[in-house]
Image: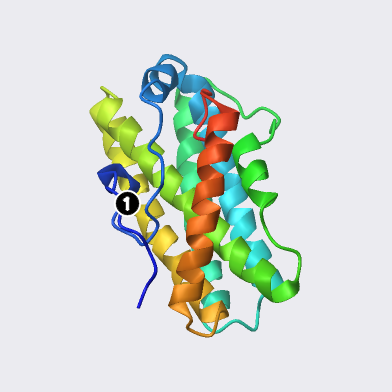
Amino acid sequence: MSSRPTPSRRPLSGAGPVILHAPTDPGWLPLALAHFDAVLVDHAHCEKKAAANALSMLQAYPDLPGLPSQMARLAREESAHLARVLDLMAARGLTLTKDAGDPYAQGLQKHVRTPALERRVDRLLVAAIIEARSCERLSLLAEGLTDPALARFYGELAQSEDGHQSLFHRLAVTASNGDEAAVDARLQHLLAQESRVLADVGLRAAIH
């Protein structure tokens, strides 16, 4: 049986297996909407890094059943998202600036264990958590944006992120030889850390 607790799910975090422990601060959406150009540039960097992460997973774990083909498809999808965000930026007269880094993702990576097998599971679970948080944030943007085309775009991306969190969770279970209870126990630990990282990062005009 799964050891996963059942806290109240924030619907915006999607229907996948990752139930975030803490919802986004209500102050984030007004900040993001007020500085949407900055959020859009950050979003482009997020999509770029998501595509790169998929290829990194393929490079590191080619022997995990199902991972190579799924990561190849994911890299292609994230690259397509990047192209769409870059088009939106161009339409608004924006250019891609140098990536200043993501303290949220960096904070999560600090909790990835070192031994190879544990590291593989943790990398997959951290990716699932980031996708779940992204799903929530993009859903908030979809609800808050007044431009119908932009709102529809972010709603579509949120659905994609929801599917990605499920994909990474499934691969983590595969990497644990099907031990879903062990994966869920580790997921809960990482989700607790994610809540702390989110609080430490604070409110930013960025996706995370």
Residue 159 relative to residue 62: left or right:
left
What residue would you read off at disc 1?
159
Q: Residue at x 53, y 24 (%)?
A: 204
How was this image coloured? rainbow
Q: Is residue 131 above or below residue 106?
A: below
* Dot 1 crowding, Cα within 10 Å, few <14, some 14–19, many 20+: some
> Is residue 90 among what the camera can see?
no
**Residue 120 image offset from top left, x and y in percent:** 65, 70
Q: Quadrant of the N terminus?
A: bottom left
Disc 1 is placed on an element classified as helix
Q: Residue at x 60, y 69 (%)?
A: 121
**Residue 29 image offset from top left, x and y in percent:** 37, 24
Q: Quadrant of residue 113?
A: bottom right
Q: Residue at x 29, y 44 (%)?
A: 10
Q: Is residue 9 above or below residue 71?
A: above
Residue 93 relative to residue 28: left or right:
right
The residue lying toward the viewer, choosing from 134 and 182, is 182
> Is residue 143 among what the camera can see?
yes
Q: Residue at x 47, y 17 (%)?
A: 35
